[in-house]
Amino acid sequence: MSIDFSHLQSDGTPGMVDVSSKNETVREAKAQSIVYLGAEIVQHFEAAGWQNKKGSILQTAVIAGTMAAKKTSDLIPLCHPLGLDSCKFETEVLADQIVITCICRLEAKTGVEMEALVGASVAALTMYDMCKSVSKGIVIKETKLISKSGGKSDFKA
């Protein structure tokens, strides 16, 4: 089985994928990170309105995730710099964890899955930072791509 790596040039050196011949299409990607806090910590922060001395935990995580998604090409080598048309977050508070979903959208020649993954990841890391004074047992359980559309190969988990 032969696998072609998109970020390797014919001589084997790394390089940015040439998307100049692609058509612009509306692209969307959805990624998710799950932050395990534990039931006691979730109850504590729910009682506090998801506020602590640093401010609003959920709002700060969303702002940080949005900022990171916009800077993905500065963080991940060989990513195309993209001007996102939309970057939205959904947070779902469960009994012992929070599910953070980042949805990025734009019209471009390349996809936005890395932006959605970076957004969800940094939102989760920010939540960790905002809550670490209460517990050292916080775990970022997983970050994964949920779906992507608009390119040559759509994906849905």
Image (spheres, rainbow, N blue to C red):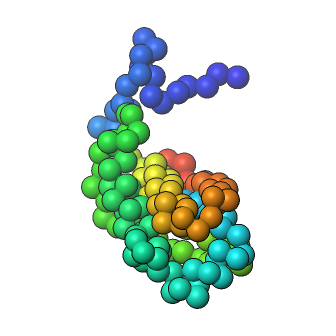
| Between 20 and 13, the one nearer to me in the picture | 13
Task: Name above or below for residue 128 compared with residue 110.
Answer: below
Which residue is located at x 55 percent, y 25 percent?
Answer: 4
| Between 128 and 78, the one nearer to me in the picture | 128
Residue 146 seen in render: no
On the rendered image, what quadrant is the C terminus found in? Answer: bottom right
Which residue is located at x 29 percent, y 45 percent?
Answer: 81
On the rendered image, what quadrant is the N terminus found in? Answer: top right
Figure disc tally: 0
Task: Name above or below for residue 121 compared with residue 59.
Answer: above
Which residue is located at x 51 percent, y 86 percent?
Answer: 49
In the visual, does 132 lie left or right of 88? Answer: right
Which residue is located at x 42 percent, y 16 percent?
Answer: 13
Q: Position of residue 89 (x, y in %)?
A: 46, 71
The quadrant in which residue 70 appears is bottom left
Q: Where is residue 18 in the image (x, y as percent from the top left)?
A: 34, 32
In the visual, does 101 lie left or right of 17? Answer: right
The quadrant in which residue 10 appears is top left
Residue 54 seen in render: yes
The quadrant in which residue 138 appears is bottom right
Task: Name above or below for residue 6 compared with residue 116.
Answer: above
